[in-house]
Every structure is written in C-alpha cells, then in structure tokens.
Image: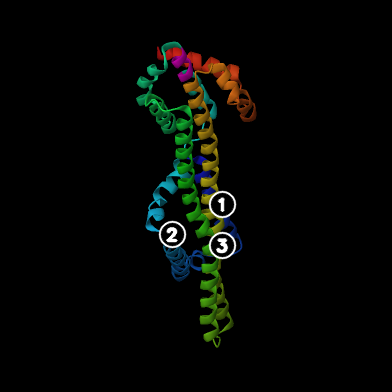
Amino acid sequence: MDILSVGGLVLAFTMFIVAFFMEGGTFESLLQPTSAMIVFGGTFGTIMVSFPMTELKKLGKCMKIVFFNAPVDRLAIIDKLAELGDKARRSGILSLEEEIPKQDNMLIKKGLELIMSGLDKDLVYDALSRQAEIDEKDLDACAAIFEAAGGYSPTMGIIGTVMGMISVLSNISGGAEELGHSIAVAFVATLYGVCFANVVYLAFGRKIKTVMKNQMAASELVVEGIVAIQAGENPKVMKDKLGYETIAELEGVNLEARAAAAKAAKQNAQ
C-alpha cells in the first residue's frame, strides 16, 4: 500500500476536522445528507454522462494505482536488461527463450517474445513503442476521470449552496438564530464540493499522472534495451547508453553499495 497516499488523505481531513471543531463547529452542522446527495450524486452522475462505460470500468484500476502502485525502479530494469544482454552474448539469442516466463515486467516479456519470433529490430521497436503508447493512454484515461470529477465537484457544491439559499430566503421570516443555522447548512455543500475536488479527485488524478510519467520513462528504457539486446550490444555499453550512472546520481543511489548488496543477496540465495 502507498503510505503517502493514505497518510496524505488522513492528514488533510484530520486537519480540516480539527480546525473546524476548534472554531466551534459540530458534527451535526458538518454532516448534511442533502448536501452530500447533491455534491456526490451530482458529480458521479455527470461523470457517467461524460465517459463511456469502457472508461468507467477502469475506476477499480484507477484506485489500485493510487493506493497500491509499486514505485518504478529504473536501475533494476537496466540491470535486468544488461543481464539478459550478457546472457544473449554468451549463450546466443535463443537462450533468452527460457527467460520469458521469469519476467515480471510485461514489456520486457513482450520484447523477448518478439525477439524470439524473429522480427526485424525496427518492427520490434515499433511494436514495443506502440504497446507503451497504449499503456500510457490507459493511464491517461484513468487520470481524466478524476480530473473531470475535480472540475465538476465545486460546481455541484455551488448548486447545493444556491438551492439551500433559495430555501433560506423562502423562509426568511424565521428568527435570526434559525436563519443563521440555515445559511450555515447551505454552505456545507460548497465545502464538500471544494474539499473533495482538491483533496481527493484532483490529487488522485495528479498521482496517476505521476505514475504514468514514471512508467513511460521506464518503458522507454525497456524499448531501447530490448533493441540493444537484439543488436548484440555489450551490456556495459547498453548501461551507458541508457544513462545508468546518470539515473543513479539523480536518485541519490550509491552504485557500489547497490552492487555489493546485490552480490550478497545472490550469494545468500545460492
């Protein structure tokens, strides 16, 4: 589970609620079923109008990306590609066939399958690039749903507030205390709309966009690496070509310590 996603939501809503109570608010004034119906029902209804069912079915995948997506280790991907390249140079390109079932990265797996099929390297490059593009569009569609919800939610909040104010003004003959309470209730809808738009919907959309950006960077490494393997490039040259040391420097990784840890893990596994 992504601790930052869960922790961020808990922190934001906790601060909002604590601050509300410190200002003298109560649960009764904060929890308004009619406001929730207008804001959440209106937002989800508008989303249903805006997107086809094929896109809406991805909501489960979207939530999984936000809360359970594993970080992309670009260095590990380059290490794996270099390892495969070294095996291809030592034992022949056909020796990679036995490596196909062992791959967790689906793009590497597809790349090896394409190599084994005997396709020209240009066709392999095009096929993998197309697959990476499809994956990117899939993630972009997930982000678009939340971004749209982030746009609709504040508007639904305003609609709820306007509806509440109409009710207040229709019964303005009531006492000042009753009138003040009714106005406060009317503004709860705006609170719901703005709060969930910024803390939930837009934040989820941005998280998916960030994941998409990281995965695309990793996919580019895989595409270039698979083509290099097929061309029989030296693994060290491949690492330099893919920017192994530059990536490590940007991510603050000590390559010597990483190599020592990997060697120790390999020895323990044996």
Q: Secondary structure at mark 3?
A: helix
Tally of numbered tags = 3
**In terms of sequence position, does the residue under pointer 2 or pointer 3 come before the other?**
2
Q: At label 2, which amino acid type do we have?
A: Phe
Read off the magenta span: 84-89
Q: Nearer the viewer, residue 117 or 10?
A: 117
**In terms of sequence position, does the residue under pointer 1 or pointer 3 come before the other?**
1
Q: Nearer the viewer, residue 213 or 164?
A: 213
Q: Kindly report the secondary structure that dominates the magenta region of the rendered protein.
A: helix
Q: Rounded to the nearest whole Å, what is the CA distance between mark 2 and mark 3?
A: 22 Å
Task: Give the residue pinned by disc 1.
Answer: 12
**x 53%, y 33%: residue:** 220
Residue 87 is inside the magenta segment = yes
The label shown at residue 166 is none
Residue 213 placement (x, y as % from top left): 55, 41
Q: Is residue 171 visible?
A: no
- Relative to 236, say whether 16 is above or below: below
Q: Nearer the viewer, residue 93 or 105?
A: 93
Task: Give the residue pinned by disc 2.
Answer: 51
Residue 258 is inside the magenta segment = no
Q: Rounded to the nearest whole Å, what is the CA distance between mark 1 and mark 2?
A: 29 Å
Residue 86 placement (x, y as % from top left): 48, 15
Q: At label 3, which amino acid type do we have?
A: Val
Q: Nearer the viewer, residue 170 or 257?
A: 257
Classed neighbour count for the residue bearing mark 3: other residues with Cα under 10 Å, few (<14), some (14–19), many (≥20): many
Residue 241 placement (x, y as % from top left): 59, 24
